[in-house]
Amino acid sequence: MSKLKCSIMVIDDHPIIHDGLKTLLATESDMEISSTASSADEALEKLSNINVDIAIVDLSLGGTDGTYLIQQIRKLYPDLKILVYTMSEEKLFAERSATAGAHGYVMKTSPPNTLKKAIRTVFSGELYFTEDTINRIRKKSEGYTDAPRTLLDNLSNREMDIFKLIGEGLDTALISERLNISRNTVDTHRINIKNKLELPNGKAVERLAYEVIQQGRMPN
């Protein structure tokens, strides 16, 4: 007999998201939020003591790389389903999340019913990604060399986090504070981003980041 109610852990560093999702799902008879966590460490500690069916994970968790947390959860709890729920743009992070082991991806800007549908889809054992993301993942897994790529694919997950924050207009000091890393580390990442994107200087990085994050224009 299949399990009737989906048990969920919400992993997000904003308490308002915990409360909002509890309210959103309170009237749903087939799902419930059993636990919440505000950091990767707290999530892993709680998961060692409780059983849930789905972890809803934000990719921005202070100084923690969300995709790394996904990898850790999949390694320790291979049967646990992971649904990314984030403000991070799907076109930039969905494929990375899927590669790390996530089963679905929903933007926080999506209508509430989209999240409910995603939870039910993932709980049933299916994936919840856009068709474009699924096609790119399938092509790469099958070894197709013509799978769409851009220079952004050269960036590590942490570099992509910083690129996104640059596009949101944050300077080195604010990025350092947001990600809980040193300014020197941020500066090193910025240099690596410039080199990997084959750009002449930091201003060009800022301009491209703005175009990608704010305007949705993807580089070649």
Image: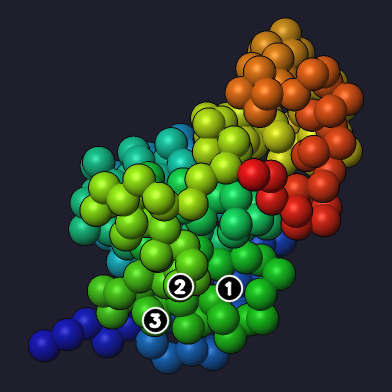
**Is there CB contact under 8 Å for labels 1 and 3?**
no
Residue matched to label 3: 120
Give the alpha-carbon distance from disc 1 to disc 3, as whole Å: 16 Å
The mark lying in front, picked from 3 and 2, is 2
The vertical placement of 171 against 65, above or below, is above
Residue type of the residue flagged with mark 2: Glu
- Assess disc 2: are there few (<14), some (14-19) or many (≥20) residues with their C-alpha within 10 Å of its C-alpha: few
The vertical placement of 117 against 54, above or below, is below
* Mark number displayed over residue 131: 2
- Assess disc 3: are there few (<14), some (14-19) or many (≥20) residues with their C-alpha within 10 Å of its C-alpha: some
Foreground of the two, 120 or 2: 120
Name the residue: 53% across, 31% down.
154
Foreground of the two, 157 or 142: 142
Image x and y of residue 85, in percent: 56, 61
Name the residue: 65% across, 56% down.
89
**Is there CB contact under 8 Å for labels 3 and 2?**
no
Name the residue: 80% across, 38% down.
208
Judged left or right of residue 92, residue 105 is left
Name the residue: 35% across, 41% down.
71
Foreground of the two, 161 or 152: 152
Judged left or right of residue 1, residue 76 is right
Q: Earlier in the sequence, mark 3 or mark 2?
A: 3
Image x and y of residue 24, in percent: 61, 80
* Mark number displayed over residue 22: 1
- Assess disc 1: are there few (<14), some (14-19) or many (≥20) residues with their C-alpha within 10 Å of its C-alpha: some
Quadrant in the picture for residue 201? top right
